[in-house]
Amino acid sequence: MIRQFVDALRKEIRKDMNNYTNDVAAGACKSFEDYQKLCGVIQGLALAESHMLALLSKVDNDNE
């Protein structure tokens, strides 16, 4: 059950990360502040994904 939750959430996080990365690459940032903000959002999403995968790994190991 938790794996399904993590997979669904990870899919959404990845979709958001890709969209923000595409925005940066396409020059959507109108200022350096916009660029910094999007980089921070991408970094935050990556960190959230990392924590989520670590939690899933811990749960998997506890179930073994």
Image (cartoon, rainbow, N blue to C red):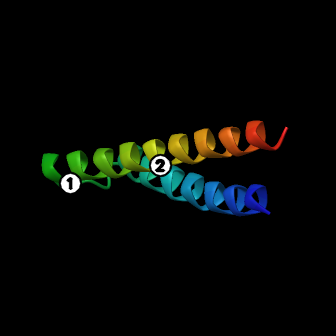
Instruction: Looking at the picture, tell me which residue is in the foreground, 58 or 9.
Output: 58
Distance (Cα) linking label 1 and label 2: 21 Å
Q: Where is residue 26 in the image (x, y as percent from the top left)?
A: 40, 48
* Of the image marks 1 and 2, the number of the one nearer the N terminus: 1
Instruction: Looking at the picture, tell me which residue is in the foreground, 61 or 35.
Output: 61
Q: Residue at x 57, y 48 (%)?
A: 52
Q: Is mark 2 on a helix, strand or loop?
A: helix
Residue topped by disc 1: 34
Hey, which quadrant is residue 62 in on the image? top right
Evaluate whether residue 40 shows in this view. Answer: yes
Task: List the single residue furthest toward the right.
Answer: 64
Residue topped by disc 2: 48
Evaluate whether residue 26 shows in this view. Answer: no
Q: Residue at x 19, y 56 (%)?
A: 30
Q: Which residue is drawn at 29% across and 47% down?
A: 40
Q: In this view, does 4 lie above or below 31?
A: below
